[in-house]
């Protein structure tokens, strides 16, 4: 196994920093071109129907996971593990209520978990529907999708 030199380590650190900066600038740019729900028209939006499946996105493209929940119960969708910033950057936006839900004063709300694809690669995103202070239980609802960045 080859040890990384200080130069190699600095180069890898710098590359991750550049990817983060590019991702943030993309998010700011996209915010000006978004649909009313704050999701760009070019985004790949997936939901419960894709659970256990796969999705492809391109570098720079937004991936949005749209899942229903009832936050009044304390339950929210949470990532089991943060994805590598080398491949996907979370944009920090997590939950909205759709116009239809707002109009009907529904307790059900759609939770949107958004990412910006970085460089080519493959990974699996896994989420649990949990009460954050309690954590997953034996009957916890789960969502999983394989992401291919081409």
Image (cartoon, rainbow, N blue to C red):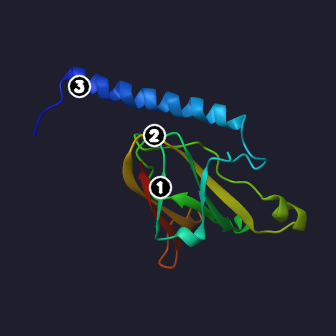
**How many marks on residues?**
3
Please state the horizontal and vertical placement of residue 121, each as a whole percent of the image: 36, 48
| Image height of 10 relative to 86, above or below | above
Left or right relative to 96: residue 106: right
Residue matched to label 2:
118
Q: Are marks 3 and 1 in contact (CB under 8 Å)?
A: no
Identify the mark at residue 8; answer none if there is no mark: 3
Of 78 and 73, the residue lying toward us = 78
Q: Residues within 10 Å of mark 1 (few under 14, many from 20)?
A: few
Q: Are marks 3 and 2 in contact (CB under 8 Å)?
A: no
Residue at 21% x, 21% y: name it. Answer: 6
Q: CA distance from mark 3 to mark 1?
A: 30 Å
Tag 2 or tag 3, which sits nearer the N-term? Answer: 3
The mark closer to the camera, 3 or 2, is: 2
Tag 2 or tag 1, which sits nearer the N-term? Answer: 1
Residue matched to label 1:
56
Check disc 2 and report its element: helix, strand or loop: loop
The mark closer to the camera, 1 or 2, is: 1
């Amino acid at each position: 196994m080859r040890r990384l030199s200080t130069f190699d380590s600095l180069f890898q650190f710098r590359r991750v920093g550049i990817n983060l900066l590019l991702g943030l600038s993309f998010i700011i740019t996209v915010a000006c071109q978004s649909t009313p729900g704050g999701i760009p028209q070019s985004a790949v939006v997936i939901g419960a129907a894709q659970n256990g499946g796969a999705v492809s996105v391109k570098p720079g493209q937004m991936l949005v996971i749209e899942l229903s929940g009832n936050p009044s119960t304390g339950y929210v969708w949470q990532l089991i593990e943060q994805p590598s910033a080398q491949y996907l950057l979370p944009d920090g936006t997590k939950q909205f209520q759709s116009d239809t839900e707002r109009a009907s004063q529904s307790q059900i709300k759609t939770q949107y978990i958004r990412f910006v694809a970085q460089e080519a690669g493959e990974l699996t995103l896994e989420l649990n529907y949990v009460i954050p202070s309690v954590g997953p239980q034996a009957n916890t609802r789960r969502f999983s999708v394989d992401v291919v960045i081409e």
